[in-house]
């Protein structure tokens, strides 16, 4: 599994460092996904990766720092990975961690997982739709959103719901880089901006009338 050369520009954050990190993480994710797909293990590998982040890295921040450390050598890291994961992780997943280590890319170990999810959705024709609403949506509301989006997105929309009481009402829908903001908070902000603009225009008009009268 060799994934050293990164792909060219994707998206996410516009800084050079972040964009480059996403590109490289994407390249490693593609390599892992293709290997897993060849073995019919895509879902199993993604579940294993999720467990690695949730059950190993999250409760053991010192271990994660050691993996990312530039002070600890690659051979020592490889020995640690084998000691900790041989017999516990699948051979494919352990080999992937060793590849990251060989290429000094264990700092990207968390960044690969969201890219794996993205690749799986993309290849299965699924379009992630992130919906923020002031209160949790019921099944009927989610179904209605999916039905409306099915006619305009290139694939089957899959709703990822998040509640945000600050929205007051309505919802914000994000599909890729496109945002449809129908929240009450945004409508109130736009109304306020319109009132300010109108007031400014009226003040300016009165000034112009006063100047022309004098």
Image: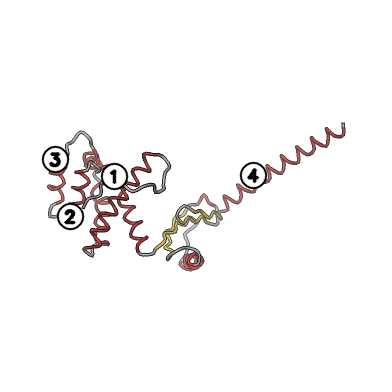
The numbered mark, 2 or 1, whose residue comes first in the sequence reads 2
Answer yes or no: do the residues labelled 3 and 2 have beta carbons within 8 Å? no
Mark 3 or mark 2: which is in front? 3
Specify the farthest residue to the top: 214
Mark 3 or mark 2, which has the lower sequence index? Answer: 3
Name the residue beneath numbered marker 3: 75
| Residue found at x 83% / y 32% | 211
145 sits left or right of 1 in the view: right
The answer for how far apart the CA atoms under marks 4 and 1 are is: 42 Å
| Residue 89, numbered circle | 2
Direction from residue 178 to residue 213 in the image, left or right: right
Identify the residue position indicated by label 4 in the image: 193
Foreground tag (3 vs 4): 3
- Circle 1: element type: helix
> Which residue is at the far right?
213
Disc nearer the start of the sequence (3/4): 3
Residue 90 horizontal/vertical position (percent)? 17, 57
Q: Could you tell me if the residues under marks 1 and 3 are in contact, i.e. CB atoms within 8 Å?
A: no
Instruction: Determine the residue positioned at 68% across, 45% down.
Output: 195
Label 3's element?
Answer: helix
CA distance for labels 2 and 1: 19 Å
Q: Earlier in the sequence, mark 4 or mark 2?
A: 2
Residue 153 in sight in this render: yes
Report how far apart the C-alphas of labels 1 and 3 lie in the structure: 18 Å
């Amino acid at each position: 599994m060799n994934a050293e050369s990164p792909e060219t520009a994707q998206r996410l954050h516009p800084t050079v460092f972040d964009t480059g990190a996403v590109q490289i993480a994407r390249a490693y994710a593609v390599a892992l996904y293709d290997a897993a797909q060849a073995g019919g293990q895509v879902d199993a590998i993604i579940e294993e990766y999720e467990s690695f982040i949730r059950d190993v890295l999250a409760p053991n921040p010192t271990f994660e720092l050691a993996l990312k450390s530039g002070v600890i050598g690659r051979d020592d890291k490889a020995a640690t990975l084998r000691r900790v994961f041989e017999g516990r992780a699948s051979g494919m997943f352990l080999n992937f961690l060793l590849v990251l280590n060989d290429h000094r890319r264990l700092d990207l170990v968390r960044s690969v997982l969201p890219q794996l999810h993205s690749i799986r959705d993309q290849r299965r024709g699924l379009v992630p739709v992130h919906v923020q609403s002031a209160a949790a949506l019921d099944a009927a509301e989610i179904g209605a959103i999916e039905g409306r989006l099915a006619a305009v997105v290139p694939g089957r929309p899959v709703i990822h719901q998040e509640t945000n009481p600050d929205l007051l009402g309505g919802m914000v829908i994000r599909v890729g880089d496109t945002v449809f903001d129908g929240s009450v908070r945004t409508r109130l902000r736009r109304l306020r901006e319109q009132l300010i603009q109108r007031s400014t225009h009226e003040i300016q008009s009165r000034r112009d009338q006063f100047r022309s009268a004098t």
